[in-house]
Structure formats: structure tokens, C-alpha cells
Image (cartoon, rainbow, N blue to C red):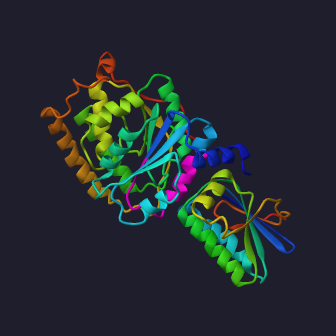
């Protein structure tokens, strides 16, 4: 049954600019998502409007060649921005543009396929309100509910997890889940530093979180494999390993200079803490 | 997604609960198609407890509507949840479907979680 107050909040959100600064920014990278993007916008809008806080939506196009951009811009929502790219550069590039354009106190990055339902946002926000700088949705943490993931993808993920932990000291068990929440300071610090344009940007961001001393919480989430994915798991894994090497080389060459960043001083006294939130997800 | 099928004299209804996406289409179709065995059948699909519909599910609902109308019946979407209502608006499908708010039919047959009808009485 329709909850009238949520629908009314949604109608207000799509017709009137929010007064002042948003508390929450949702960033969705999109590349040729004409088939999926409108239901995703609807799901995000429903949940965020139901929360009753000012929020904005940023869709960072990544050079789509289909009607993704037209579908979104035709909506003319006053609190949604569509960042148009002249060409496809990669998911990392799109997320970076979106996050750096965000104005909210908290910045959520969420994949366009709703594989992690937006309702999981609330449990990530809980962690940031406890003092964490970054909350990472995880399919590997205890309590996560994962469905539809192939054996190949699960096996490759486990292997890469070992490589990431041993080779990089990143203790997060699922670096690649497309559902991460940042405080505004953390978002700006990390995405001004990160340089990887493809899907390995997630790992880079978590590596940088440790480097600058941000507190990272890993939160088990519900995750449903989005049908129609064209990702070649084996090919992606090989690329991921290559990117690991590149990130390490970039660091050794001083590309991640953190001295000039305002929030580093704040983070300097902190020791990176990786924890699995003691919450569980029901199927 | 949970699927419950109810049949009564001259009307049928399907209640859906959870996430209606491409993974759930086969189950939905197994529940829906047997209901069209007679011409002029109106099938009500109750969406009060649906939290998300993706494009594949919307396409399947359109397919169901077309199948029902081809046999002089109709598909009626009942009790739209907030996300369903908003997604139908965004996709400009709100005017394409017949919608209503109302109660469902008396229970006659209930489907299991895969959509396969199960006799209850």
C-alpha cells in the first residue's frame, strides 16, 4: 500500500529544489544504462525521500552511447544532476567526478544496477555516525546475504582477497562492492588523491584510506546479482591484478602525495581500523 | 519474491512480495499463465509488498497485459507500493496499465515460492 507521506515527499523532491545544502549525496555512475537507470532512480528516490532528509542525486555518466543521458535529463528533477562525459573513461573516472561534485555531509556511491538495494544505506550511515570515515558494503563480511553470484566469481573474489590483504595490507574483505559511504571530508580527501579510472578504483580508495589514516567500517549487506551483466569475471580479475601493481608503483613514485590535503592533519593521529559491523542481514 | 495466487468465481489475483526482477520472471509467469485459460479473464496483480521492480519485470507485466487483452481480459495492477508507483511514473507506464486500489479475491489456490500453484482447499 502506498505510504502517502513518502510519495508526497517524493513529489516535493522532484518539483522543488531542496533548501540549502543536502545532508546526503547519492552518486550513481552510469554507462549505457538505459535499460536499468529509471527503476534505479525510482528506488533510490523512494528510500531517500522516505528518510525525510534533504538529499541530492548525482548521476555521473561515463560517455554513454545509448539514451541514458536523455532519459535522465528529460526528467528535469531540480535535485538531480547529470554529469555528462564526452567519452567513456571508466567507472573510477565517473565516480570521481560524481563524488567531487557532491555537496552532502555524507556521500554514497551506489552502482546503477541496484545489486545492493538502497535500503542498505541506513546501516552504513549508522557506522559513520559512530565515528567512522568510510563505510563499505560487503558481500564477504559475516552476515552478508548474497544471491545469484556464480561459483567462478566467488572463487576469483576469494583469491583476489588474499592478494589484496597480503600485498596491500587492505583488511577489507570485499573491496569491490559498489556501495560505499563516505563523510564529506573523507570523500574529498580520497577522490582528490585517487587516479585509477577503471573498476579498480575501489581498491585504490581503500588503500588510500589506510594511507591517510581514515577509519573504515565493513558492513555486511544484501546483494543480488544483476542479470544481464556483461562483465567477464576472469578478464576483470586479470585487469585487477594489473591495477594492483600500478597502484603500488604509483605510490612508490609519490603520486599519492597527501601533505597538502586539509583533512590529512585530522586523520594523521588515527590508526586505520577495519571492523566488521556486528549487524546481520536477513535473506 | 513471494508469489501467492488466488482464484475465485470470475476473477483471479496474484500477490507479489519482495523484489521483482529478472530472476523472478519465470516464477511469476508460472503463476500468471494458467490464469488465462478462459477468455475474458481479469487478473489483478497486488503489488503492495513489492519493494523494487526492474525493467525486466516491467516488461513482463506488459507482456502479461498484452496476453490478457488478447483474450478479451485485462491485467490490473492493485495497491501499488511507493517504489512501484514511483517507478511506473518515471518510466511513463502509469497510464499504460490499469491500476486500482482494492481488496483481493477469495483464496482458492496458493502458489509456492517458485510460482507453482498449490491447491489449498
Relative to B25, is A8 above or below? above
- What is the quadrant of residue B80 in the picture? bottom right
Picture coordinates of residue B55, whole percent (x, y) = 54, 64
**Magenta region: which residues?**
A28-46
Residue B38 visible at all = yes
> In the image shown, does A99 or A211 lie closer to the viewer?
A99
Specify whether residue A216 is painted magenta. Answer: no
Rendering coords of residue B96 (x, y %):
66, 70
Residue B31 located left or right of residue B38: left
Residue A32 is one of the magenta-drawn residues = yes
Quadrant in which the N terminus of chain B is drawn: bottom right
Q: Residue furthest left?
A: A253
Q: Quadrant of the C terminus of chain B?
A: bottom right
Name the residue at the top extreme: A269
Whether residue B72 is situated above or below residue A127 in the rendered picture: below
Residue A188 x, y percent position in the rendering: 34, 33
Coordinates of residue B115 in the picture (x, y in percent): 66, 65
**Left or right of residue A205: residue A54:** right
Amino acid at each position: 500500500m502506498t505510504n502517502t507521506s513518502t510519495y508526497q515527499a517524493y513529489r516535493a523532491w522532484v518539483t522543488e529544489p531542496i533548501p540549502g545544502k543536502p545532508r546526503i549525496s547519492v552518486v550513481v555512475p552510469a554507462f549505457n544504462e538505459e535499460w536499468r537507470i529509471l527503476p534505479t532512480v525510482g528506488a533510490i528516490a523512494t528510500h531517500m525521500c522516505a528518510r525525510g532528509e534533504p538529499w541530492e542525486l548525482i548521476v555521473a555518466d561515463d560517455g554513454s552511447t545509448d539514451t541514458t543521458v536523455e532519459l535522465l535529463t528529460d526528467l528535469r528533477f531540480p535535485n538531480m544532476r547529470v554529469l555528462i562525459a564526452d567519452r567513456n573513461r571508466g567507472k573510477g573516472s565517473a565516480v570521481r567526478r560524481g563524488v567531487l561534485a557532491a555537496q552532502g555531509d555524507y556521500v554514497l556511491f551506489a552502482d546503477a544496477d541496484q545489486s545492493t538495494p538502497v535500503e542498505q544505506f541506513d546501516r552504513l550511515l549508522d557506522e559513520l555516525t559512530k565515528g567512522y570515515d568510510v563505510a563499505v558494503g560487503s558481500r564477504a563480511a559475516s552476515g552478508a546475504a548474497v544471491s545469484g553470484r556464480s561459483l567462478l566469481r566467488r572463487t576469483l573474489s576469494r583469491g583476489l582477497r588474499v592478494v589484496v590483504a597480503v600485498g596491500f595490507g587492505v583488511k577489507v574483505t570485499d573491496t569491490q562492492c559498489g556501495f560505499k559511504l563516505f563523510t564529506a571530508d573523507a570523500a574529498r580527501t580520497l577522490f582528490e588523491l585517487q587516479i585509477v579510472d577503471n573498476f579498480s578504483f575501489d581498491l585504490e580508495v581503500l588503500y588510500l584510506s589506510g594511507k591517510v589514516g581514515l577509519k573504515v567500517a565493513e558492513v555486511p549487506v544484501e546483494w543480488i546479482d544483476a542479470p544481464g551483466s556483461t562483465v567477464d569475471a576472469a578478464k576483470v580479475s586479470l585487469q585487477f591484478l594489473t591495477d594492483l601493481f600500478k597502484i603500488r608503483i604509483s605510490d612508490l613514485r609519490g603520486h599519492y602525495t597527501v601533505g597538502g590535503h586539509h583533512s590529512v592533519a585530522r586523520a594523521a593521529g588515527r590508526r586505520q581500523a577495519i571492523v566488521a559491523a556486528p549487524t546481520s542481514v536477513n535473506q | 519474491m513471494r508469489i501467492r495466487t488466488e482464484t475465485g468465481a470470475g476473477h483471479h489475483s496474484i500477490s507479489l512480495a519482495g523484489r521483482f526482477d529478472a530472476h523472478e520472471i519465470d516464477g511469476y509467469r508460472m503463476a500468471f499463465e494458467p490464469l488465462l485459460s478462459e477468455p475474458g479473464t481479469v487478473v489483478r496483480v497486488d503489488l503492495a509488498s513489492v519493494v523494487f521492480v526492474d525493467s525486466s519485470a516491467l516488461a513482463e507485466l506488459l507482456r502479461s497485459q498484452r496476453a490478457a487483452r488478447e483474450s478479451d481480459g485485462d491485467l490490473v495492477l492493485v495497491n501499488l507500493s511507493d517504489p512501484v508507483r514511483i517507478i511506473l511514473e518515471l518510466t511513463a507506464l502509469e497510464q499504460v496499465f490499469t491500476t486500482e486500489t482494492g481488496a483481493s479475491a477469495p483464496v482458492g489456490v496458493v502458489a509456492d515460492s517458485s510460482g507453482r500453484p498449490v491447491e489449498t482447499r
